[in-house]
Each structure stands twice: as structure tokens, then as C-alpha cells.
Amino acid sequence: MSTLAEAINGESNSLDTRIAGVDRFVLMSVAVAALILGGLIWQVGSMRLLWLFLIGGGLGIALYHAAFGFTAGWRNTITRRRSRGLRAQLLLLGVSTLLFIPVIVLTDARGAIAPVGGFVVIGSFLFGLGMQLGGGCGSGTLFTVGAGNRRMLITLMAFIIGSVLGTLHLPWWLSGPNAGAIDLSAALDPLGGVLLQVTLLAALSYTLIAVERDRHGDVEALFVRPQGDWLRRFITGGWPLIWGVVALAGLGLLTLIVSGSPWGITFAFAIWGAKALAGVGVDMSQFTYWTWPYPAQALEQSVLLNVTSVMAFGLLLGSMLAAGLAGRFNAGSQNRLGLGNVSAAVIGGLCMGYGARLAFGCNIGAFFSGIASGSLHGWVWFAFGFIGSIVGVALRPRFGMSN
Amino acid sequence: MPTERPPYSRIALVVTLSTIVGLVVLDYWVSLG
């Protein structure tokens, strides 16, 4: 996933040259911010929210150290027929399906089950297009911002604006026809749902391997034995993708168990944007979405009580910590910001924000958590998000971005 | 072979983190009504 590594490091991901020495100033800054935020979360919220803040931190470290990017994995499949990144995502979905569905069936935890309709089709298409122009998905945007990438800060700002716009229009989109929420593990029984999903994911992986072998005559291995000191690599980064899969699946499961619902990201962006508007005097209660019980409560309460916000703060600080451990903080900001890539960041961010609201989540809330929960909307998101990404990849050169 | 650490502004890092923490505290204060 070299292109994601470029977003983080501003250069090719040559793992053996990444270790430039731990950046103590970054680590100290993260420690102070984490202590203050963690203390506030514990004081205002609860121990449970503090755990979720720490889990978010772990996710940020795993995403950064494994350079686990959904966007670049899809782009490499589309442009070069190199599918190692996408196959890692499919493996993550398969493992998470095996972990999530039993927990959802046997406990009070709720899955990320959402309705299927035209809004998911259009929203996921916009998101897929936007993530190629923006240079990162929901998780990718957040963790590259944490790692100090200033272009991704522009994407994040536009993402937040797009999220708020999406909330204003979502009630209209939902007023159209839809098929309702379809939970595969309920429709088929849990075992049938798990078997169907794992079979589909395996078939997709097999197809990707066949296409890659047909194009290149070989297949990039997903399971690679790392060279050198494993402990040093674990701490300072350059993880094999498979370590990322294990960490994300484990922390995703912990999120489900501790919070009672799967990991999500983009609802936090909508809250932050709506709070900013409310802060400058906009009456958000004039908008239907912000009168619905959950959004209204989230808008009124402190962000310290909101699970997605608390986890997003943790993720930001976790990726910053990881970048400091790798000695690569701000590495993604070394390239010049031009009109083309700034425009792409703005358009991509707006499309992702708007699309994520319509599609009931981003690559995490809908694609990862939705599919791992057995929700059909996650699969629809995958299909149309991928089509959107094909269009986004085709548009990148128009903004001076390489593929 | 180790690479050089990329340059960045320490002041910008501290200001950014302080702004995030400050906004969270302000939001908490506003939520108290």
C-alpha cells in the first residue's frame, strides 16, 4: 500500500529506512494531551468511556504502524491489479464476522444494522469517489491528520462540513422507498449468516488472487515474515499488514463489547460540525435530523460523553504517538500544497462527509462494522463505494494527483 | 540506514493540541448550560 505510505510519510514506504529515532517532543505532547483528555473523560464520563478512548488510541497506533489504508488498497486493485491491501481488508472482515456475530447474538450488543435504499447506493458511491480525491477514508483521514499531514487536515475540515450538510438532507433521502434494515444473521440464522459472509469473502479473495496472477504472473503475499527485531518493529512501526488485521479485529471486538455497538467514526464529525454551527448562533433544532432523539442528545451533551467522539480523539492521539515513535511526525506534509490537490482534498472531504451520512456510515461504520455485523447495507456500501472509487481514481489525474 | 526526521513546527503542534483540548473544555462548559 505504497500510496498510503506516501500520505503518511511523503515518500515510498521503505520500512527499513523509517526508523529515524523516537521523537520525544511529539511523545511528550501526546502524553500531556492524553492525560488531560483522559482525565476529563474519566471525570465527566465514566471508566467505560476512558477504556474506549484508550481503544481508539490503540486503533490509531495499529492503523499508522501497519499503514492500513482502505483507500490505497482499493486504488492499487483498480489501477495495478495488486490486491494485497484489499485482501487484507477482506480477511479483516472475515475474522470480524466470526467474532462479531456470536457476540451480537449472545449478548446485549447491537450490530451496525441499517436500512438499504437509494440513499446507501448514492452515499457510498460519493464516499468511494471522495476517498480517492481526499486521499483517505474515514479512518485514513483521521489517522493521517494525527500523524501531522496538513493536506489531510483540509480533507478533514471539508469532511466535517459535508457531514453536517448530509444531516440536513438525510430526512429527505429517507422519505423515499427503501427495503428496510436487513440483518443476514437474523434472516438466515446466525450460522447461515456467518457461512454466507465468509464464503463470499473467500470467493472475492480468490477472484482477486486469480486476477493478480493473471496480470502479473505472481501474487503479493499477505503473510510476510518481518525482518529484524520484532519488538522494535512493534514499537516503532512498519508492521506487516497481517499484524494490522489482528490488531484491528481485536480492538474492533473490544469496542463492540465495551460500548455495546461497533466502531464508528463519521457521526463524530457531524456532531463537531453541528456544535460549531450552534456555537455561532445557528439554531440546529430547525433541522429535522437534529430533533431526532440520539442526534439531539449528542448535540446537547458534552463530546466527552459521546462514544464516537471519544474514540476519534483517542485515534488522533494514538496515530500521533505512533508517528512520534517512528520519528515520522509531519512526514506527509513535505510535499507542496497546490491548487489541484487542495481542491481535490476539499471536494473529496465534502463527498465523503455527505456520502457517509446518506450511507449510514463510512468505510468503518458501514463497510467494516456493517459487514461484520451481517448487515446487507454493508455489502451494498462495498459494491457502490468501489464503483465510486473507480470514478475517483479516474478523476485524480485531473487534479494533478498520481495513481 | 536511518533517515532524517521531517521538520515541523513545535509551536504549531502545541497550539493545535491546545486548541483541541480547549474546544473540548469549552464544549463541556457550554453543555453544563
Image: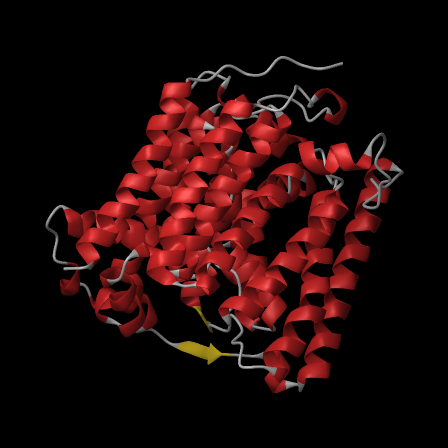
Counting from the top left corner in percent of width and height, residue A126 is at 44, 50
Q: Is residue A268 above or below residue A230?
A: below
Quadrant where the image shows the N terminus of chain A: top right
Whether residue A217 is visible to the viewer of this picture, yes or no, is yes
Out of A19 and A211, give the one closest to the viewer.
Answer: A19
Quadrant where the image shows the C terminus of chain A: top right
Whether residue A338 is visible to the viewer of this picture, yes or no, is no
Q: Which residue is painted at 52% across and 62% down in the image?
A: A366
| Total labels drawn | 0
Q: Which residue is painted at 34% across and 40% down in the image?
A: A158
Out of A227 and B11, give the one closest to the viewer.
Answer: B11
Quarter of the image for residue A240 reads: top right
Instruction: Please state if A57 lies on the left or on the right of A306 as rendered.
Output: right
Q: Is residue B2 above or below residue A403?
A: above
Q: Is residue A284 above or below residue A346?
A: below
Counting from the top left corner in percent of width and height, residue A358 is at 39, 61
Question: Which residue of the protein is positioned furthest toward the right in this rendering?
Answer: A217
Counting from the top left corner in percent of width and height, residue A301 is at 26, 62
Instruction: Please state if A212 lies on the left or on the right of A333 as rendered.
Output: right
Counting from the top left corner in percent of width and height, residue B21 is at 33, 41
Q: Which residue is painted at 62% across and 12% down in the image?
A: B4
Instruction: Please state if A108 lies on the left or on the right of A281 as rendered.
Output: right
* Coloring scheme used: secondary structure
Q: Is residue A113 above or below residue A393?
A: below
